[in-house]
Image (cartoon, rainbow, N blue to C red):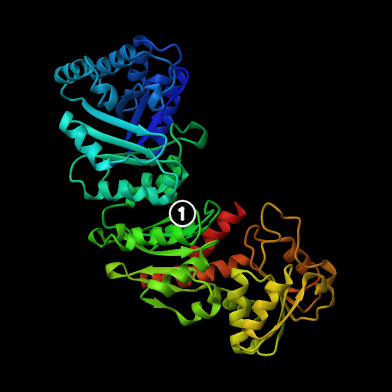
Amino acid sequence: MSYLTVSISGCDVKEMSSRAVRAKSAGADLLELRADHIEGLDWEKAKHAIKSLLGTGLGLIVTCRDKSEGGAGDWSLEERIGILSAAAGKGARFIDCEYANFVRPGVREQITSALADNPDCRLILSAHNFEGPFDDLEGLRDEIKNEFPAAIPKLVYTASHINDCFAGMKLLEASSDELIVLAMGQAGMITRILAKKYGGFLTFASLSSVEATAPGQFEISEMKNLYRWDSINEKTELFGVIGDPVGHSLSPAVFNACFDSQGINGLYLPIQVQGAQREFDEFINNLVNSTDNGGFGFGGFSVTLPHKAHALEHVTRVGEFLEPLAGDIGAVNTLKLGIGGRVSGYNTDYAGAMGALCAVMGIEKHQLHQVSVAMVGAGGVGRAVIAGLAEVGAHVTIYNRTVEKAAALAEEFNCKYAGLDELEQMDAEVIINCTSIGMHPDVEASPVPKHCLKEGMTIFDTVYNPLETLLLEQAKAVGAKTVDGAEMFVRQAMAQFKLFTGQEADEDVMRKTVFGCLCG
């Protein structure tokens, strides 16, 4: 079992008690009392806090952290070790002592004596590195176990990039002993969820973002609900969205809701991969070169900005299969990991865009032949849209701020191009916005002048946050048909779901989740 632990801090015992009750209500398995946060710390206050937290009925870890390893207050080593030793006799299920302090003269003797007198209490020996990864994670684990075999080693380090997480994940997955390994910071957040899949003894969550006791903690409500904590086990297949940033993505909510409703043992995570081609390649290689552990259990990824071209380049160079359409578009938005780490690349933006447009227009795809289309933007989404339109013979003009970029794309797909200043003269049946103009928080902007919109047109905005952009609002006002970005998102996500799982996605669940996220 991996214990979902909420760390309880606060200036006074009353506040700590209130937080403990909230943690139990939210579904925590264990509480950690951060005694170093108690204002005016002494044994009487610590004893009162321990009694109060034990009153919840949850198991309790008592920690009085050294300031050098993230603790609060300038409590002396003698004070802190005294509180830990006494806590062992007051019902604490675990006490957490820094390994660096445990090996100091006199500390081991005091701690082990307290544990011998209270055999129901166990020792966690912890090591923290706030600067980066440990030089030898496995060696540190072995050193702790050799020093005190009954202890549970706790190794917590800072990840500056997601690629720093793999050493910890590998050690945790390969270990048959009780072990805690977590990476701090935004780059290390997935280790806090994956601790359960890989058999970590426990992980930490916070009650809220302002009550976190370490960088990168998820809120317990997210762990339990969005990331399906109670359903995770060693057989859970992993998926995720690769991008930078990824915090805004709707994909985790959408895919996890479908896994839940369809009884699929899957988990979908936000994967922030910073950097460019080198860092992207390193991330994928960390997975595919880990065939001894099945690529850490990952089965596939959605790919968003800025990595669609990086994914294409990677699959072209070393992948097993590249969908021809993805090659034509020049972007991969879906990666599938196969047996032995084989990687295949696809593009579902194309199907999402064409399906959304044709559904609102009430036509089949081939009926777009010779339809005049004004496409605003020449970026990654635009490439997928224009590939679909070119395939059916639509008459497309690309409008872009950088005319040279529009010209290059137009030459590639044999269509026309112009600068944004020529939108005033356009004569199109369909207008498609493939830029980020109008996206939250810049919701008062529109890529197309209002007077260019006319009754009878179809206006497609690939932006999905907000659900109704200013462009679509103005289009509806003049009687034009409108297509929102959420429609494209749902359709491309359904295609990804089929690639990932071999099953059809529950469309109703996807739509309900998307609209729930966007409309509150």
Tell me if residue 195 comes above or below residue 387 in the rendering: above
Is 114 or 324 nearer to us in this picture? 324
Q: Residue at x 42, y 36 (%)?
A: 131
- The location of residue 265, given as percent across then percent down, is 32, 59
- The location of residue 23, given as percent across then percent down, is 41, 33
Tell me if residue 373 comes above or below residue 164 in the rendering: below
Is 61 or 512 nearer to us in this picture? 61
Is 444 or 72 nearer to us in this picture? 72
Q: Quadrant of the N terminus?
A: top left
- The image quarter in which residue 480 lies: bottom right
Q: Is residue 293 left or right of residue 512?
A: left
Q: Residue at x 42, y 63 (%)?
A: 301
Callout 1 amino acid: Pro
Is residue 356 something that shows in the picture? no
Q: Is residue 380 left or right of residue 290?
A: right
Q: Which residue is mark 1?
A: 270
Q: Residue at x 59, y 78 (%)?
A: 354
Element at label 1: strand
Tell me if residue 367 comes above or below residue 308 in the rendering: below
